[in-house]
Image (cartoon, rainbow, N blue to C red):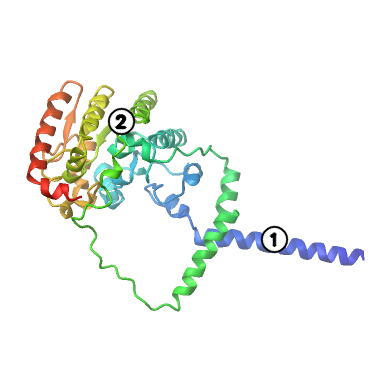
Amino acid sequence: MFKSLVKNLILFLFTIIILTFGTFFLNKYTDPYGVKEILNDNNFNLFTLSKDLYYTTINLSQKNKYDYVLIGVSSDKMETITKQINQNYGGNIAFLCLPIAHSTELYETLSYFLKNHPEVKTVLVSMALECYMNQCIFNEPFNTKPSNKYNDFIKLYFSIDTSTKSLEILKEKFMSLFNNKEENNNEPYNNDIFVTYNERRHYNWANSTCENTGINNIRKIHDLLEERNIKAVYYIGPCHANYLANIMYNNKYQNIENYKKEIAQITDYYDMSFVNYYTSAPLKYFFLDPYHPNYLMLGKRVLECLFNNNIDKNLAVHITKDNVDSILEKQKTDLINYFDKNKAFIERW
């Protein structure tokens, strides 16, 4: 009886060990969240991760060193020009560009990243219109609290969620062996159809239920970087003139003017969200869609502005509290002229 019990116990422990190591190597091999790729890359990028893994991945990144941080949203993703940053500006950059982010998420993520990476020298702060102005349509900020390295280890290599995703990946790989259909990657990358970014995306900008959290979080970011003595460069990235014209058509443009004026009272910044040579050209030339720039085309010009203060006057203006009124007046006049020329097209959306 005793020998049988010992035998069963040994068999049980052996099974547990096999399952434990099997689960670990399964999840490490498949890396379903792409964490390994992020940590092995010279340039950190949280965009593809679920929110509950932001802090975990930042914790695991402590051995890596970063000179620059770009904090923003999907419209600020510049991974396509990473090599230019490394070659021209000499350093690694962390892209903290979160998908459909609340401004509080951006502040909290940046704050936590800087605690783990005090070596950061420069932070590029995107003050994207949709993120900081359009708080009503976004989900509440994530409530994830920093975890310790043991919890991170379990979450990445032994959790049920991770294992399930790993098995799904293996299943897809196995099924692909018997599927000879070729994927069609010849679809056009962008077009002139303005569908996704219609008035629904900015309808609530003037909604009285919205708190002024966007401006408050810009102020908090500003104070955080000053306190840490980190160089900060603030900017509003490019968006197509059609996007701005549609906002004017829906009588919401005054909100953008108010937003830009309030930022100017906090800090100087570069503004690229107005009618200019690049934003008024046909959409397919410099944009993926009306709100997402094509940084393969615009990246070099944007970086020259942010890193070297080398402003392409066809793309950006430098706004201060002293010149904000005159610049906004000209921007509004230019937008009205653009709207009048394209009114028939704008009204069809």
Cα distance between the residues tagged 2 and 1: 50 Å
Residue 289 versus residue 170: which sits nearer the camera?
289
Locate the N terminus and report the quarter of the image it occupies: bottom right
Residue 196 versus residue 63: which sits nearer the camera?
196
Residue 42 versus residue 55: which sits nearer the camera?
55
Residue where numbered disc 2 is placed: 232
Type of amino acid under label 2: Ala
Indicate which disc, 2 or 1, sits on the residue closer to the N terminus: 1
Locate residue 30 relative to residue 71 in the image: left or right. Answer: right
Using a 10 Å C-alpha cutoff, classify the residue at mark 2 as few (fewer than 14 neighbours), some (14 to 19) or many (20 or more). Answer: many
Using a 10 Å C-alpha cutoff, classify the residue at mark 1 as few (fewer than 14 neighbours), some (14 to 19) or many (20 or more). Answer: few
Asked if one can make out residue 320 in the rendered structure from this viewpoint, the answer is yes
- Is label 2 in contact with label 1 (beta carbons under 8 Å)? no
Locate residue 73 relative to residue 160 in the image: left or right. Answer: left
Q: Residue at the location (30% across, 43% down)?
A: 201
Q: Residue at the location (33% across, 28% down)?
A: 215
Secondary structure category for the residue under label 1: helix
Q: Residue 186 lies in what quarter of the image?
A: bottom left
| On screen, residue 16 above or below 133 | below
Q: Position of residue 108 (x, y in %)?
A: 44, 34
Secondary structure category for the residue under label 2: strand
Q: Position of residue 65 (x, y in %)?
A: 41, 41
Instruction: Give the number of the disc on residue 76.
Output: none
Residue where numbered disc 1 is placed: 17
Q: Position of residue 34 (x, y in %)?
A: 45, 55
Asked if one can make out residue 124 in the rendered structure from this viewpoint, the answer is no
Residue 56 versus residue 195: which sits nearer the camera?
195
Type of amino acid under label 1: Ile
Q: Position of residue 277 (x, y in %)?
A: 10, 44
